[in-house]
Image (spheres, rainbow, N blue to C red):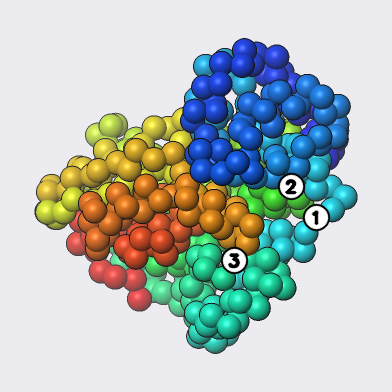
Amino acid sequence: MTDKSYAEEQLTRATLDHCVKCTICETACPVSAVTPLFPGPKFVGPQAERFRNGLSVDHSVDYCSSCGACTLACPQGVQIAELNSQARAVMKKNHMPLRDQLVSRTTLMGTFMTPVAPIANMALDMKPVRTIVEKVVGIHRNAPMPTARTQTLAGWLKKRPKPAEPATRGPIVYFHGCAGGYFETETSKKAILVLEHLGYEVLVPKQGCCGLAQQSNGLFEGATKSVLKLCEQLRSAGKDLTIVSTSGSCAGMLKHEAHEIMGVNAEELHDVGARTREMSEFLLDLYEAGELDTNFERNDITIPYHAPCQLKSQGMGMPAIALMELIPGVSVVESGQACCGIAGTYGLKKEKYDIAQAVGAALFKMVKETNPDLAVCDTETCRWQIEASSGVKTVHPIWLIHQAYGLPDPR
């Protein structure tokens, strides 16, 4: 069965009739709470699905951000967000906006922006340019954009000297995701230095996109090709090694979304997904096994922390909080908010930008009031959203661990 027919015919129907119309998902939905354009997860999910028969009967499903709050809240185990994602793919299969195709090509974006990074960044900061892009492409003029770097992570790895100390724990695979390879290279470098400090030989195979942005925009066929290619690339480093990632959303694509939403049932996906750990999850596991170096330098700071919806959907809890609070002096305040609003590429779109801002408003306020200088979040687009909308520098938890170990800044 192809990914398209999976979306048309399967539609997670194993859970569909478990819906008892309790409306708990409606109360959990951050989107329907701020706009009448989205009638709620129950209506466009299990209720509408009973009438679709392979067709999308209501285009309001495209206003679902796929944050997954409804699925997490459902006491009956109905995969509501997954139903909505599949219905969106069916709706768009014969009419895919150019904008949705463009924002899904993150690796291509990084490849083109890196050689002209200063010019690209300057252009993205110019309101007239952004206004034209909004009118022509449909990406909102105020939507957060990644910062292009003059050097990719791969370029840094080629030029850096080998670690001075030999590995004492054997090899481990690092999965950086598209953003970590092109835009948030500092996060990737700090992650590699921390893993090396802990005694690992860090293997970073050539790796492309996981296909998450394509999947969330309904491009299932392209997303399937991307994720399977990535799996083979990660497996090339060793088929029995743990894979650690600082991209929580991309890790989720490997661990469950490609299979549960698109129906990808390949052996290589199951293998890679089973071996993949988000960075904070991995480090906290080491701590609980008594294998983590906790000789941290003191850092007296109170930090606002937001757990992204894509992380919550993986069922790992919030390991970053326990991990950061191992550092003497660190106090973490959890946001208590379901979503920052960006939801991958959702909040970039002209017609959804204001909705995304309304969804994240309480989070932005909380961040500014807790610490106007620094916030922490596990996924890239959520960090960009929080930083752009609150004005507070927002980093991955690995930044604090890197600092607590007293490691030098990557060069």
Q: Residue at x 25, y 69 (%)?
A: 408
Say which quadrant the N terminus sits in.
top right
Q: Identify the secondary structure beneath mark 3.
A: loop
> 10 Å neighbourhood of mark 3: few (<14), some, or many (≥20)?
many
| Residue closer to the observer: 172 or 154 | 154
Q: Say whether marks 2 and 1 touch (CB < 8 Å).
A: yes
In the picture, the disc for residue 218 is 2
Determine if residue 95 is in view.
Answer: yes
Residue 203 shows up from this direction: no
Please give left or right for residue 18 compared with residue 308 in the image.
right
Question: Quarter of the image containing the C terminus?
Answer: bottom left
Residue 134 against residue 285 in the figure, above or below: below
Say which residue label 1 marks. 96
Q: Is residue 336 above or below residue 223?
A: above
Q: Earlier in the sequence, mark 3 or mark 1?
A: 1
Q: Please tell me how crowded label 1 is: few (under 14), some (14-19), or many (20+) other residues with Cα within 10 Å.
A: some
Residue at image x 69%, y 45%? 62
Residue 102: x, y in percent? 71, 65
Question: Can you tell which quarter of the image residue 347 is in?
Answer: bottom right
Q: Which residue is mark 3?
A: 140
Q: Residue at x 47, y 50 (%)?
A: 358
Q: Which amino acid is tagged 2?
A: Gly
